[in-house]
Image (spheres, helix red, strand yellow):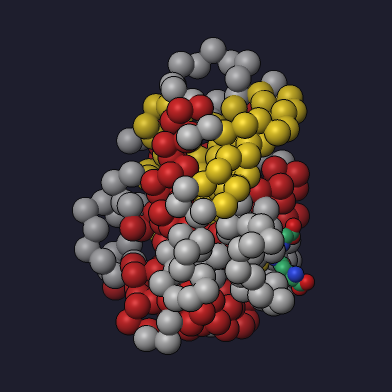
Amino acid sequence: MIAEVIERHYSFEGEMLKYRHQSEVLACEMTFSLYLPTLVTKKDYSLIWWLSGLTCTDDNFTQKSGFQKYAAAHEVAVIIPDTSPRGIEIPDSPDWDLGQGASFYVNATEEPWQKNYQMYSYLTEELPKIVSDLIPNLSGNESIMGHSMGGHGALMVGLKNPTRFSAISAFAPILSPSQVPWGQKAFTHYLGKDKSSWEQWDATNLITKPFQHKLPILITQGSEDNFYENQLQEYSFLATAKENKQNINYQKVVGYDHSYFTIASFMEEHFKFHVTNMENQ
Ligand SMILES: N[C@@H](CCC(=O)N[C@@H](CSC=O)C(=O)NCC(=O)O)C(=O)O
C-alpha cells in the first residue's frame, strides 16, 4: 500500500500533509490528511481521528477548524479521512445528502453502493494499516471525534470498537440517524428498507450494548444550529445512554450554529478532553 504526499505545509511547527492512495477496500483512489507534530522530539504519538460531515472532504477540517495549534501543543497526530469514495465512476446522487460526500461511514449492502461504499472497513482496517506504515512510532493510544454526519460516525465507530479508542467527542452529531430524515434516506439507500439492518450502524442503538469499557463521550451542540430540530435532537440518545449508565457530557452552547465557527470555538476543549483520556489509558 503506497500513499503519495500531494501537499505539505508547515503549521505550528508541525506538518500538515495530504496523501493520495489507491484504496483496495473502496476500489477507488482516495485522499486523506495527516497532521504530524514533526518538530518535537516526542517518541510515541497518540492519534486522534476526525470524521467530517455531509458535503465535506478532509480539507474542511484542515482549513477551517484551527486544530493544528492544539495538536502541536499536545504533541498528538491527527488523521482526517475523506467522507466517501470518490470519482466519476463511483455511484453518486444529485442530492448533497446522499452519495459522494455522504457515506455515513457504513458498509453498504445495497446496489449500486455496495462495491465502493465500504467506509467502515476502510476506516477500521485499511487506513489504520496505512497510517501505521507512515508513522512507525504510534503509541497505540487512539481517540475519535467528528462533526454532524461525522459526529455520528465517531460515535458509531468508537462504540463498535470500545477497546481501541480512549474517548469519543462530537460536534452537532446526528445522534439517532434511524429516526431522522438524513439518516433514514442514507440508510434506506445503503442498507435497504429492513430497519433491523440499520441497528448495527446507529449510535442510539449501539449505546445500549453492554460494552466492556464505557467510553467517555463529549458532545457540543449549538443552540442556533438550523439542523437541530429536524436532524440532531438528543433526547432519544441521551435517554438510552442514561438507562445504560453511559458516561456522556452533552453541552448545549448558546448562540452557536452548525458551522466550523462553532467547531473552531470549542476545538481546544475537545483536544484537552481527548488527550486527558488517552493519557489515562
Ligand atoms: N450544502 C448544504 C449544507 C451542507 C452542510 O452544512 N454541511 C455541513 C455538515 S452537515 C452534516 O453532516 C458541513 O460541515 N459543511 C462544510 C463546511 O465547511 O461548513 C446546504 O447548502 O445547505
Q: Which residue shows up at 61% across the image and 63% down it?
A: 90
Q: Is residue 127 visible?
A: yes
Quarter of the image with the C terminus is: top left
Q: How many marks?
A: 0
Q: Which residue shows up at 46% across the image and 16% down it?
A: 43
Q: Which residue shows up at 52% across the image and 74% down it?
A: 112
From the top left corner, tell me how far across and down residue 139 is, in percent. Answer: 39, 27
Q: Which residue shows up at 60% across the image and 24% down it?
A: 37
From the top left corner, tell me how far across and down residue 132 is, in percent. Answer: 44, 30
Q: Is residue 106 visible?
A: no
**From the viewer's perspective, is residue 269 above or below residue 52?**
above
In this image, 247 relative to 24: left or right? Answer: left
Point out the quarter of the image occupied by ligand 1.
bottom right
From the top left corner, tell me how far across and down residue 235 is, in percent. Answer: 47, 78
In this image, 250 relative to 121: left or right? Answer: right
**From the viewer's perspective, is residue 146 above or below residue 21?**
below
**Residue 18, picture quadrant:** top right
In this image, 145 relative to 62: left or right? Answer: left
From the top left corner, tell me how far across and down residue 210 is, in percent. Answer: 22, 63
- Residue occupying the far top of the picture: 41
- Residue occupying the far front of the picture: 89
**Residue 243, picture quadrant:** bottom left
